[in-house]
Amino acid sequence: MSIFEYNGSALVAMVGKNCFAIASDRRLGVQLQTVATDFQRIYKIHDKLFIGLSGLATDSQTLYQRLVFRHKLYQLREERDMKPETFASLVSAILYEKRFGPYFCQPVIAGLGDEDKPFICTMDSIGAKELAKDFVVAGTASESLYGACESMFKPDMEAEELFETISQALLSSVDRDCLSGWGGHVYLVTPTEVTEKILKGRMD
């Protein structure tokens, strides 16, 4: 078993019309044994920028702490929040810095940039970015997430439809992966508000 699969995870981000959603499962396991069913994988950087970290849970938490530290330094120096594109470059640089002993994480970054244009991207454990205009996935359930998102995604969805689509994609995908599941955690971000919802899924 790969070290990326040790704790199990499922992450997906999707864009809509001037909005985006980012969702994850809630299971923390040690291989096939479930340890917690309320684990947080998605972290808020500021009101219009979120990062989801799949992979090894300990590395995810360490990386998140470093990112918060760097973002606070940026806020002090620049007196503004970081743009999503800038933040993606920061994450990429921090990961590449540790390329010979990497953080075993695959981040998913989602944010609203200039003129509330949604930005999503993912990268591997050494910071090679993959930008997308529709959706990005990561974690042990990524293969089934690709299939579900590919069939359900439509361009320019309104916020409510986007929430419904990402929720259905997540729940149907984690049912096909034994290392992720136990419900879902969805953030829906529009220019004016952030909605956080907990999904109930199969408890096995």
Image: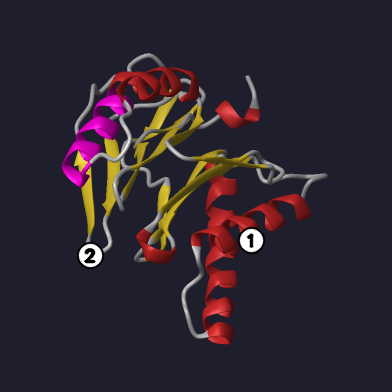
Q: What segment carries the magenta color?
A: 158-171
> Could you say which is closer to the camera, residue 17 or residue 75?
17
Q: Which mark is residue 197?
A: none
Query: In the image, is 155 to the left or to the right of 53?
Result: left
Amino acid at dot 2: Thr
> Could you say which is closer to the camera, residue 51 or residue 157?
157
So how many labels did they put on this image? Answer: 2
The residue identified by callout 2 is 192
Q: Main secondary structure of the magenta part?
A: helix
Q: Tag 1, which secondary structure?
A: helix
> Could you say which is closer to the camera, residue 15 or residue 11?
15
Query: In the image, is 46 to the left or to the right of 99?
Result: left
What whole-number distance in Å separates the C-alpha atoms at marks 2 and 1? 26 Å
Outermost residue on the left side: it is 160
Q: Which residue is drawn at 31% across and 53% down?
A: 18
Residue 101 position, x and y percent, is 78, 45
* 18 versus 151 height, above or below: below
The residue identified by callout 1 is 90
